[in-house]
Amino acid sequence: MAFLTDRKRATGLGSAKQGTEHFWNMTVSSVGLAILVPLFVFTFGPMLGAPHDEVVAYFARPFPAIVAALTIWVGFMHFKNGVQVLIEDYVSGLARKVLIVAMICLSYAAAATGLFAIARLAL
C-alpha cells in the first residue's frame, strides 16, 4: 500500500491554470456572436440571389463588410476554442496533439480565406 499525501494524489489531475482563460474567451466570443450573427443575417440576407455587381457594390460599403469580417473572425476563433476543449476532453495521447494543431491550422486558414474574400469584395 502506497502512502500518498492528498497533494501527491492530485498532482497531474487538477487545474492547469488555463481553464479560466478558455472560459472567458468562450464567453466573450459567445456574447460577440450573439450580437454579430443577427447583424450578419440582416445585412447579408438582402443580397442572397442578387446579381454579382449588386453584391460587390453592397459589400464595398463599410458597414456590411465590417460586420461580415467580424462575424467570420469571431466565429472561427470561437470554433477553434470550442473544438480544442472538445478534443482535450475526449482524445488522449499523440492524437490529441495532432488534432489540436490540425484544428487550429484549419480554423486560421478558414478565417483567413473568409477575410480575404470579404477584402476582395470590399476593395
Image: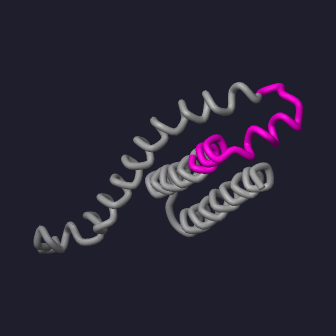
Looking at the image, residue 112 sits to the left or right of residue 9; the answer is right
In this rendering, position of residue 92 left or right of residue 18: right
Task: Please tell me whether residue 109 belongs to the stretch shown in magenta.
Answer: no
Q: Magenta stretch? A: 48-70
For the N terminus, the image quarter is bottom left
Q: Residue at x 77, y 55 (%)?
A: 123
Where does the image place residue 15, in percent across and percent down from the top left? 26, 64
Q: Is residue 36 above or below residue 77?
A: above
57 displayed left or right of 72: right
Between residue 33 and residue 25, name the one nearer to us. 33
Q: Where 95 sits versus 34, above or below?
A: below
Side of 121 relative to 5 (left or right): right
Could you say where residue 25 lies in the image, as x and y percent from the top left? Answer: 39, 55
Q: Is 64 part of what is drawn in magenta? A: yes
Q: Nearer the viewer, residue 5 or 33?
A: 33
Main secondary-structure element of the magenta-colored stretch: helix
Q: Position of residue 58 (x, y in %)?
A: 75, 38
- Which quadrant would residue 105 be assigned to in this image? bottom right
How does the figure colour the protein chain or chains?
Answer: one colour
Q: Position of residue 101 (x, y in %)?
A: 60, 67
Identify the residue shown where x is 56% and y is 63%: 100
Q: Residue at x 34, y 61 (%)?
A: 21
x 66%, y 56%: residue: 111
Q: Nearer the viewer, residue 121 or 11?
A: 121
Question: Which picture quadrant has residue 110?
Answer: bottom right
Q: How many marks?
A: 0
